[in-house]
Image (cartoon, helix red, strand yellow):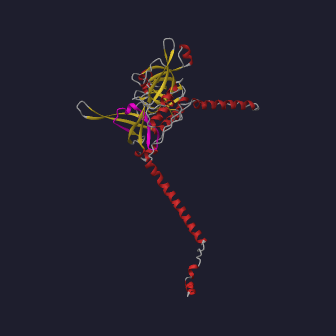
Amino acid sequence: MAEREKEDFAFINEKIKAKPVNKKRILKQGSYTVGLAVLFGVVSCFVFTLIRPGMESWLHPESNPVITIPEDSQEAALGTEELWETEAVRETEEQEDTEAPAQETETVIVKELEIADYQMLQNKLYAIGKEANRSVVTVTGVVSNTDWYNNAYESSGQASGIIIQDNGSELLILTEHKVVMTAEQIRVTFVDDVTVNAYLKKYDGNTGIAVLAVSLNELQEGTKNSIAYAKLGNSLAVAQGNIAIAIGSPLGTNYSIGTGNITSVGNVIQTVDATYSVFTTDIVGNSRSSGVLLNLEGEIIGIVMQDYSGNGDNNTLTAIAVSEVKKVIEMLSNGMDIPYLGLTVVAVTDKIAADYDIPRGIYIKEALLDSPAFDAGLQSGDVIVEMGGEEILSLDEYESKVLSLKPGTVIEIVVNRQGMDEYLTLKCSVTAGRLQ
């Protein structure tokens, strides 16, 4: 009996063996898992790539790209002339080193210019102006008024504007602020006679330069194809006697073209916190003239500003050298305010310092009443020697320092002020403002 019971429960003593590993099955499952992971990664990357721009613009909306206008240098202006001199020296040296047999006498034929030749040159000059006219627009500032009988009516003022560039969403147009200063509505008419609304982006209360903006979404493809962007040239290369082409509205009529010569480049206009070179021309103009001056490459070298004409002479065109206002145009294009201290200044050179026993620096001719500089205690006769911890000895250094400020920021200015027996050093904290 006992033996039988043992046999009945003998299975309890049996050893359970582990199931043998199926390597093929594991390999198959592993490959399947890895394949799904790779497929998931590819699909995820594809979906992420598609939705990333939209998600970024939604979570982190970006502003318009920053407009950058490179500044000009005197070295760049002299580059062409130096190249010509180098080539002339090289040709001379090659002629000296080359021993040639006796040269044959060449007959030089001088052709007398005919009137038709002169007309041909004029046609080429006007062709440059006609091509540049694609960047010209008509700016109209509309103002609502009432007459003596309380009847409402609209008045408008017009001037030319120049398309300079776009920031991806807006077309930027350079013009004069006085045209749109009191305007309730601004309209811009392009070369194809299409008119759209514009708005004032920013303006400089000192020079009167303004930048308008037009939404690119409002422009049809036909208009976009018909317009062109003007190029800002290097006015440091301009010399007396150079040919200039005036576009815009030289005589008050838009899209007109004038040609002539630069009659002087040495005149300067001292304005608040800046000094600008002014070009005079023999191109006929009047008080309503606006636009720009071009060189023979079709590049802008001057912005017509009849308000800067000497002694009120508006019979010929006067323009500000564009190289000296490029920084201002750049700031306005980016929607930045132009800082304002309220000083008219002149540089104290080594000769002036020796002749008049004045410290080297920037001499303050006038601190405008109620200006930030006036309120901080600066006065005429002071000599600025340091701004924001940096030595200031030239007008370029002073103007660059002023333009680097933002309205509302405080800068420490060190001046030398004449005392009873000697100049005293004073420090003033000036809060930069904005000229209206």
Q: Could you tell me if residue 17 is visible in this image?
A: yes
Furthest-bottom residue in this view: 1
**Residue in the picture at 46% in, 49% down:** 56
Quadrant that contains the N terminus: bottom right
Can residue 315 be seen from the camera position used here?
no
Q: Residue 250 placed where, x, y %? A: 43, 31
Q: Position of residue 171 (x, y in %)?
A: 44, 41
Question: Where does the image place residue 406, in percent across and percent down from the top left?
Answer: 45, 32
The vertical placement of 285 against 354, above or below, is below
Which of 273/118 is in front?
Answer: 273
The part of the chain drawn in magenta is 160-187
Residue 243 screen position, x and y as percent: 52, 29
Quadrant containing the C terminus is: top left
- Residue, far left: 149
Quarter occupied by residue 199:
top left
Magenta span includes 162: yes
In the picture, measured across the screen, residue 85 lies left or right of residue 135, that is right
Instruction: Specify the farthest residue to the top.
Output: 421
Foreground: 117 or 44?
A: 44
Q: Residue at x 55, y 31 (%)?
A: 114
- 195 displayed left or right of 403: left
Residue 198 is left or right of residue 109, and the answer is left
Q: Is residue 372 magenta?
A: no
Q: Nearer the viewer, residue 395 or 122?
A: 395
> Which residue occupies the foreground of this view, 195 or 65?
65
The residue drawn where x is 57% and y is 18% is 350
Number of on-image labels: 0
Report the magenta stretch's main SS: strand
